[in-house]
Amino acid sequence: MNNNSEENSSSRGGVQILQIRRLPDFLQSVNLKYVKLGYHYLISHLLTLCLVPLMAAIIVEASRFSLDDIHQLWLQLQYNLVSVILFSAFIVFGSTVYITTRPRSVYLVDYSCYLPPSDLKVKNHQFMEHSTLMGKFDESSLEFQRKILERSGLGEETCVPEAMHYLPPRPSMTAAREEAEQVMFGALDKLFANTNVKPRDIGILVVNCSLFNPTPSLSAMIINKYKLRGNIKSFNLGGMGCSAGVIAVDLAKDMLQVHRNSYAVVVSTENITQNWYFGNKKSMLIPNCLFRVGGAAVLLSNKSVDRWRSKYKLVHAVRTHCGANDKAFKCVYQEQDDAGETGVSLSKDLMAIAGGALKTNITTLGPLVLPISEQILFFVNLVAKKLFNAKTKPYIPDFKLAFEHFCIHAGGRAVIDELEKNLQLLPVHAEASRMTLHRFGNTSSSSIWYELAYTEAKGRMRKGHRIWQIAFGSGFKCNSAVWVALRNVKPSPNNPWKDCIHRYPVQLNL
């Protein structure tokens, strides 16, 4: 999903710089910070603090036992042999039921992001020259695209498909298939090389691409290319927007709960070749400026032996769908303009609808991931708001206590800005998203994997760190995936940031 808030004037940032602000009360801020931090640690470790004196009392009592006391206890157990056997049988039965019915752990063994060749790169001025020479856009549309590019946050190394480098462009079914093959096979080749997994060992395949759904399907193209086995469970998700990557992971997770000792591959991509807009409707021109070539392939496993070589474990997948609301349903909408040109139209209500979807999603996700201290504060604030003062400022939970890393879908600068503001994140938490948008553009559902690769390339991922991947998509959907690092994660050999990570982060002047 991208956004159209880049239309707004950029002069606001300059005005803010010139404003005279009073310095905050640092003493009060620091005190509040440490009071809240101490409260968080107290509540989070409350059970441990209660158990410590209990265990100490048990140890003290046990130390007073003499040999005669131990002998008497053994005799009592012998005389109550039936009770002991029944109790042991109950424990064994309960343990067996728990082990056989509990959800299987899903591990992320590794993933690979497609790195387009350098000849597909397009600088912003080249993009505008090309758009002008096409002869398809009027002066108003060209000026609009120029302003979007200036404020988009995209850098000078994003890539468009080969068909769009020609004059005139050559969009065709053949060119679209070639783009899909280059992206999907490029990511999968690296994935299989990194993991040493043979293609015929894959039992589940999920492919998501929103706007290009040929026959045979993209999943069938992969099966044919790698000669996957005949009984593979394959799925092809279409029309689900930029949040489909999380949906694909969730579907693979559900399949791995059913099929034991299996590998699942998730391929997330988008196809640009046949979906370039050649009209002059401004709400449909924004995708041209933001969407770029990209894709990712992810290897998941439910094999316990794979835990030791896997990077992450899937903890939660939470999906929110607002399609029952007409405005939400049509805020990202593929249609034809008055001249018959097909494109994706973005509504002016997009950011408000995304905010509502996010609120619903984190309402479900919050109780699963937030520490009890934050849940208590939120509950108390809610009760106070309902009972005493309807104007009480709502308490926004501190998700920085639940996650160390945030992978916010790089749909556009305004999307990242709004989430950083509403979730009260620090600039470092949104850094991976901003740099991914700068280096690769909006790669749709695969952007969250480029962001995770950025964090790894920076050497920031440590064992036990929690990651929140959050994406928005047409429909309208907001989906979240939560992972935990199983070790200190080093970047894979073919990390897409390998040759440029030393240049990042860059300073964005917007």
Image (cartoon, rainbow, N blue to C red):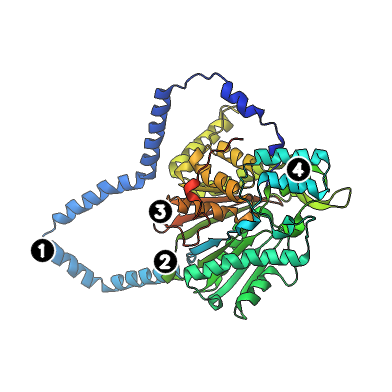
Say what secondary structure mark 1 lies in.
helix
Which numbered disc flags the more N-terminal residue, 1 or 4?
1
Question: Rounded to the nearest whole Å, what is the CA distance between mark 3 and mark 2?
Answer: 15 Å
Which numbered disc flags the more N-terminal residue, 4 or 2?
2
For badge 1, the amino acid type reads: Leu
Residue 345 seen anywhere in this rendered image of the structure:
no
**Residue identifier under label 3:** 464
**Residue identifier under label 2:** 309
Q: Quadrant of residue 213?
A: bottom right
Find out whether the residues at labels 4 and 2 contact each other: C-beta distance under 8 Å.
Answer: no
Residue 476 appears left or right of 250: right
Q: Is residue 351 above or below residue 308?
A: above
Question: Residue 118, position in %: x, y?
Answer: 60, 57
The residue furthest bottom is 230
Which numbered disc flags the more N-terminal residue, 3 or 2?
2
How packed mark 1 is, by other alpha carbons closer than 10 Å (few <14, some 14-19, many 20 or more), is few
Question: Rounded to the nearest whole Å, what is the CA distance between mark 1 and mark 3?
Answer: 44 Å
Which mark is in front, 1 or 2? 2
How packed mark 3 is, by other alpha carbons closer than 10 Å (few <14, some 14-19, many 20 or more), is some
Viewer-proximal residue, 158 or 349? 158
Say what secondary structure mark 3 lies in.
loop
Question: Rounded to the nearest whole Å, what is the CA distance between mark 1 and mark 2?
Answer: 48 Å
For badge 4, the amino acid type reads: Ser
Question: Residue 279, position in %: x, y?
Answer: 83, 48
Marking on residue 67: 1
